[in-house]
Image: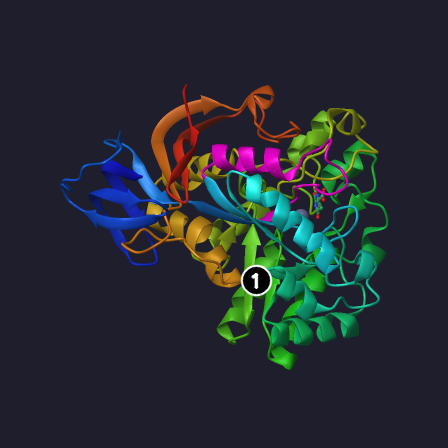
């Protein structure tokens, strides 16, 4: 099978490629990237006026499979991903049962064989995410885990976290840390500040995230092992990351579009679709996160795609934290940074396509002859309204509902096959 992408604006950060070019794909591999390719292709896609970028790798999603497949499963989560130009995801282990055992990792890998995109499991750091007994990282790695995390929960004890960072490093796995101090949080549900006071609800102090991030950075420094910081949301963490990177600490990090697009003011609506963990914070935090994305202090843009049912989200105080994001992440990022001329497309490609794969050691993330043919074709200028009921995800809890974004995925290609086409 030969697929020819004609006249697209090809952008690939890893090999610093940018230009109006054709891309010839044969089976699952990119065969040639050049001007005016003459080939006898089975299918030709006219990409004039469209951007051709490597498929996005979202290294932080929750697919709820096994255990809560009424919210999402590996198949529907992958459909949502494909619609967002995402060709690979790393899915977090807070499933039921928890992915703390090679058998659960194998279940995910096996089910993902029928999925439209590449689904890589993240194993747990501790058994049952309880923060006590470390998992067998070598066994998780051998079963196919690409990282370890207790995401959704912190590892409470610093000694345990340090041990995990050393053991995981020697097993060839990155540790992804959910930085939260539950002793400080004490049941808070939104950012602690003017909005939580006005609404009369328990706040989540920023100190919780700041203090555990500082701990993880210090552990990485002292033990000389890497750490990846999940979903950065505060300005103080941005300062910590800048300081640590300057000192040569092996720290990488990610944030999500809601942290650079929205603030805690949304919570005045008392709508739990604006509740996630960490929470939406202040204008100053949003500005600091945006600056850190633009200057590369933060390495990756992820979604923390966290599907929950409408019934659960109906109760503002009791609803679980989390928002879906796979179908809006690229559009939100383009709208915020590209269309305001604050970032070039190649920088966005680096943060969404290249860096997550480098951090996890995954294939792909570039457009080059010989590379795997995982590609997103994007209409950068198409404006669209986020309508929750039109999302492919089983759950519709998006915090971007009713917003207009500029930039829409037209085709998604995985292993040389078209897995999504926007027919609008
Ligand atoms: O908002 C969140 N939802 N944050 C997390 O850390 C966990 C996630 C979930 O699993 O729903
Ligand atoms: Zn998460």
Classify residue 293 as left or right of residue 263. left
> In the visual, does 236 lie left or right of 411?
right
Q: Quadrant of residue 282?
A: top right
**Between 123 and 27, the one nearer to me in the picture:** 27
Residue 413's image quarter?
A: top left
How many residues crowd around disc 1 within 10 Å: few (fewer than 14), some, or many (20 or more)?
A: some
Count of all numbered marks drawn on residues in the image: 1
Q: Position of residue 11 (x, y in %)?
A: 30, 47
Pick the quarter of the image with the C terminus: top left
Location of residue 342 (image quadrant): top left
Q: Which sits in the foreground, 328 or 394? A: 394
Span colored in magenta = 60-85
Rendered position, 95 above or below 210: above
Residue 201 visible in rendering? yes
State left or right for residue 368 relative to residue 80: left
Please name whichever residue, 317 or 312, is drawn nearer the observer in this view of the structure: 312
Please say if 331 is above or below 422: below
Q: Tell me the quadrant of the picture where the N terminus can be found.
A: top left
Secondary structure type for disc 1: helix
- Identify the residue under disc 1: 239
Q: Give the percent coordinates (x, y) of residue 85.
A: 45, 38
Residue at image point 79% right, 32% down: 199
For this view, does 79 lie left or right of residue 349? right
- Residue at the spot x=66%, y=54% of the render? 106
Q: Indicate yes or no: mark 1 CB to ligand 1 under 8 Å.
A: no
Name the residue: 63% across, 65% down: 141
> Considering only vertical position in the picture, is 69 above or below 13?
above
């Amino acid at each position: 099978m030969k697929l020819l992408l004609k006249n697209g604006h090809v952008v690939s950060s890893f090999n610093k490629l940018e230009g109006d070019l054709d891309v010839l794909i044969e089976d699952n591999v990119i065969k040639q990237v050049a001007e005016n390719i003459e080939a006898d292709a089975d299918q030709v896609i006219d990409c004039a006026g469209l951007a051709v970028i490597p498929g996005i790798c979202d290294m932080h999603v929750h697919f709820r499979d096994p255990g809560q497949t009424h919210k999402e499963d590996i198949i529907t989560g992958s459909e949502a991903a494909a619609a967002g130009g995402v060709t690979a995801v790393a899915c977090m282990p807070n499933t039921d049962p928890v992915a703390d055992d090679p058998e659960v990792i194998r279940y995910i890998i096996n089910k993902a064989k029928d999925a439209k995109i590449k689904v890589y499991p993240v194993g747990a750091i501790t058994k049952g995410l309880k923060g006590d007994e470390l998992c067998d990282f070598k066994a998780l790695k051998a079963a196919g885990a690409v990282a370890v995390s207790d995401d959704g929960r912190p590892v409470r004890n610093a000694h345990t976290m340090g041990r995990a960072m050393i053991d995981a490093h020697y097993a060839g796995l990155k540790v992804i840390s959910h930085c939260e101090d539950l002793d400080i949080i004490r049941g808070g549900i939104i950012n602690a500040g003017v909005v939580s006071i006005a609404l009369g609800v328990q706040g989540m102090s920023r100190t919780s995230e700041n203090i555990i991030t500082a701990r993880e950075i210090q552990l990485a420094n002292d033990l000389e092992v890497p750490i990846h910081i999940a979903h950065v949301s505060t300005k103080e963490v941005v300062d910590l990351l800048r300081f640590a990177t300057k000192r040569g600490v092996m720290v990488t990090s990610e944030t999500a579009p809601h942290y650079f697009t929205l603030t805690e003011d949304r919570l005045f609506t008392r709508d739990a679709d604006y509740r996630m963990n960490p929470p939406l914070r202040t204008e100053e935090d949003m500005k600091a996160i945006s600056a850190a994305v633009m200057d590369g202090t933060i390495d990756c843009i992820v979604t923390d795609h966290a599907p929950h049912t409408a019934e659960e989200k109906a109760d503002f105080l009791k609803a679980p934290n989390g928002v879906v994001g796979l179908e809006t992440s690229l559009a939100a990022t383009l709208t915020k940074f590209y269309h305001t001329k604050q970032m070039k497309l190649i920088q966005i490609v680096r943060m969404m396509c290249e860096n997550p794969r480098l951090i996890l050691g995954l294939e792909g993330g570039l457009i080059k002859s010989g590379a795997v043919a995982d590609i997103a074709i994007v209409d950068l200028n198409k404006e669209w309204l986020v309508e929750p009921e039109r999302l492919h995800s089983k759950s519709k809890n998006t915090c971007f509902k009713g917003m207009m974004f500029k930039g829409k995925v037209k085709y998604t290609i995985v292993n040389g096959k078209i897995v999504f086409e926007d027919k609008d």
